[in-house]
Image (cartoon, rainbow, N blue to C red):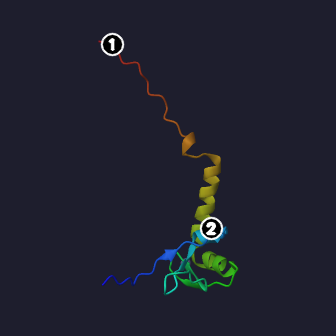
C-alpha cells in the first residue's frame, strides 16, 4: 500500500565540498541502500546530469540553466560579508513621555 513513487533527492556525502553540491543531490538506488552516483540530480529543475567523478558537467548545467541563481548567490555572499542581520540595530525610541 505504501508505495513510494516519488523519489527523494538525497544530499551528497559530506566529503563533497564543492559549491555546486548545494544545487545537486543523488537519488537512492532501487533497493534504497545506496546512492545512485551515476547521475546527479539538479535540485532546481530535477534534471539528471551524468556524473563521472568531476563536477564539470554539473557546473555547466548551473551556468547554462541557472545562471541567475549563481549570480544571486554571489550577491548574497557579498552582502553577508559586509553586514549581517546582527549589525542592524533598532534606533533608540525617544523615551521622554510628557508628564501629566
Ligand atoms: Zn537544473
Determine the image quadrant of residue 86: top right
Q: In the picture shown, does residue 12 fall above or below 53?
A: above
Q: Say which of 57 and 5 sits in front.
A: 5
Q: Indicate the secondary structure of the residue bearing disc 2.
A: loop
Residue 67 position in % (x across, y down): 60, 72
Q: Residue at x 52, y 74 (%)?
A: 10
For disc 2, the marked residue is 14
Mark 2: few/some/many CA within 10 Å (<14, 14-19, 20+):
few
State the residue at coordinates (63%, 75%): 63
Q: Is residue 100 above or below residue 14?
A: above
Q: Residue at x 67, y 67 (%)?
A: 17
Instruction: Examine the rendering and report whether any part of residue 81 can be seen.
Output: yes
User: Which residue is most to the top?
Assistant: 100
- Is 58 on the left or on the right of 45, as rendered? right
Secondary structure type for disc 1:
loop
Picture layout, residue 74 above or below residue 67: above
Residue linked to disc 1: 99
- Return the x and y of residue 75 as percentages of the image width and height: 61, 58
- In which quadrant is the N terminus drawn? bottom left
Q: Are marks 2 and 1 in contact (CB under 8 Å)?
A: no
Q: Decide which of 83, 15 is in the foreground and name it.
A: 15
**In which image quadrant can residue 77 be found?**
bottom right
Amino acid at each position: 500500500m505504501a508505495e513510494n513513487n516519488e523519489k527523494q533527492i538525497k544530499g551528497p556525502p559530506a566529503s563533497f565540498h564543492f559549491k555546486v553540491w548545494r544545487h545537486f543531490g543523488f537519488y537512492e538506488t532501487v533497493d534504497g541502500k545506496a546512492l545512485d552516483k551515476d547521475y546527479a540530480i539538479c535540485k532546481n529543475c530535477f534534471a539528471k546530469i551524468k556524473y563521472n567523478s568531476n563536477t564539470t558537467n554539473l557546473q555547466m548545467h548551473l551556468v547554462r540553466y541557472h545562471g541567475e541563481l549563481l549570480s544571486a548567490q554571489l550577491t548574497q555572499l557579498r552582502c553577508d560579508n559586509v553586514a549581517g542581520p546582527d549589525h542592524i540595530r533598532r534606533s533608540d525610541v525617544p523615551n521622554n513621555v510628557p508628564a501629566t
